[in-house]
Amino acid sequence: MNISFKKALVNLSIILCILFASGVVFCSGDGSHTARESSYSVFSHGFKVGQVKTVCEPFSRGNKKCFKFQSETLVHANFLFYSYGLDKKEEALVADDGAFYYKRTSLQNGKAQLVEGQLQKNGFYFTIEDNGDKRTQVIDRGEYDFTTLDCPEFNMGPDEKEKTLRVLDFEHLTVLKRSYKWLKDEDIQVDGKLIKCKVIEFSDSYKKCRRWVKIDELGVLVVRQDGKGKEGSYTTRIVSLSVKPQAKTAKNNS
């Protein structure tokens, strides 16, 4: 297997968080009690290497309408001289003014990691556990404009084609300067239906991506994303989409 493909597989944990932690924020609730489920296939260097399932559902926090986002990522690549495995679960709680809770558990090639964070008055407080080694980290609220969960590009268009923001990246637990550019509107077919998407390009110190997103009554939906980072490139495409009645009210994690 060529080295660039190996690196691309190793980099998938970062790649997939970029995609699915970016489509979490869903516009302010209208009383709807439905959950949106989306399934994706992930390709790298022409090979299908993984799949992702996401679910978003509304819940109440005091008098505020919020959304609970969950995703499950499975990547298993087995070759003659190399194998790679990733099993990752993410959960986030998002309000109109941004994300206030985030949790990620992952097992990557046998290495376990747990990240859990919560917004308090002066910053986002994280606990990180790597194979049993525990540490904490605090990122001051004044250091960032949005998080990657807040999807700040969703209102861009012909009237606002470019902007640069300070973004709290939940995968790297650092604040990045990320530049966004609206390119065009384009129709993408999903399950036999045409979905009108905004095509947005963004870049930071880790990667450059092009994303097809849609906004509707449930908020922001990522339909497709193509990206390239230091270790490789990838394409992620939605393969199924459904809106179902909410099974139960999500619990407040704060």
Image (cartoon, rainbow, N blue to C red):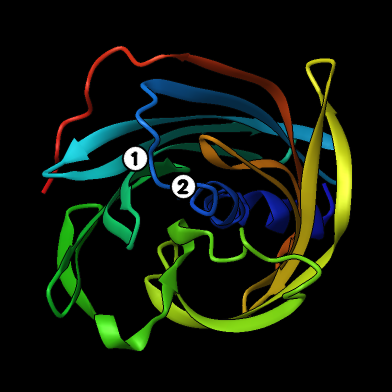
Above or below for 73 versus 192 = below
Check residue 164 in the rendering and tell me which mark sits there, or answer none: none
Where residue 169 sits: x, y (%)?
45, 69
Above or below for 240 versus 212 = above
Above or below for 179 versus 52 = below
Q: Nearer the viewer, mark 2 or mark 1?
A: 2
The answer to whether marks 2 and 1 mark residues whose Cβ atoms lie closer than 8 Å is no
List the single residue furthest toward the front: 30
Where residue 137 sits: x, y (%)?
20, 75
Residue, disc 2: 27
What residue is shown at x 57% (from left), y 57% (from top)? 18
Does the rendering let one see residue 46? no
Does the rendering let one see residue 163? yes
Residue, disc 1: 67
Mark 2 is surrounded, within 10 Å at the Cα level, by few (under 14), some (14 to 19) or many (20 or more) other residues, namely some
Where residue 124 sits: x, y (%)?
22, 71
What residue is shown at x 80% (from left), y 59% (from top)? 4
> Would residue 127 be found to the left or right of residue 195 on screen?
left
As helix, strand or loop, the secondary structure at mark 2 comes to loop
What residue is shown at x 12% (from left), y 74% (from top)? 121
Of 52 and 122, nearer the camera is: 122
What residue is shown at x 45% (from left), y 60% (from top)? 150
As helix, strand or loop, the secondary structure at mark 1 comes to strand
Q: Earlier in the sequence, mark 2 or mark 1?
A: 2
Amino acid type of the residue tagged 2 in the rendering: Cys
